[in-house]
Amino acid sequence: MTETEARAKVLDLLEDVSGDPSVRDHLDDDLFELGFLDSMAAIELLVGLEDELGVSIAPTAVERSEMNTANKIAAQVVKRL
């Protein structure tokens, strides 16, 4: 899987988890502050990342500030591919 494909999959998962396609317009904005993610949605996202991409990120492995934007989440995924 290429980095571009992984980033696209992360955006797809974020849209599914948040239920809002406009999440794609906020790549560098805090998704928790904007209401796209909460603690339950974040866990759902982590499960989706593991199921869809084979990337396991434990909730305790990274600080929330390292995974609070779409671009930061994608970077964490790409780093683990």
Image: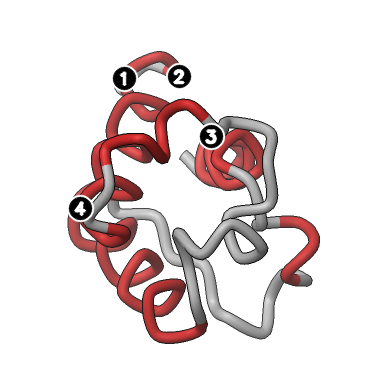
Quadrant (top left/top right/bottom left/bottom right) for the N terminus: top left
| Secondary-structure class at tag 1 | helix
Q: What residue is pinned by disc 3?
A: 78
The x, y position of residue 71, in whole percent, is: 61, 34
Q: Is residue 46 left or right of residue 20?
A: right
Residue 39, how many percent across, how many down?
50, 84
| Dot 3 and dot 2 residues touching (CB under 8 Å) | yes
* Image x and y of residue 73, in percent: 57, 47
Does 18 sit above or below residue 38? above
Give neighbour class at mark 3: few <14, some 14-19, many 20+ (Cα, 10 Å).
some
Give the mark nearest the N terminus, 1 or 3.
1
Q: Are marks 1 and 2 in contact (CB under 8 Å)?
A: yes
Q: In what element is the residue under mark 4?
A: helix
| Whole-number angstrom distance, CA of label 3 to CA of label 2 | 6 Å
Q: How is the image coloured?
A: secondary structure
Mark earlier in primary sequence (3, 2)? 2
- What is the three-letter code of the residue carrying label 3? Val
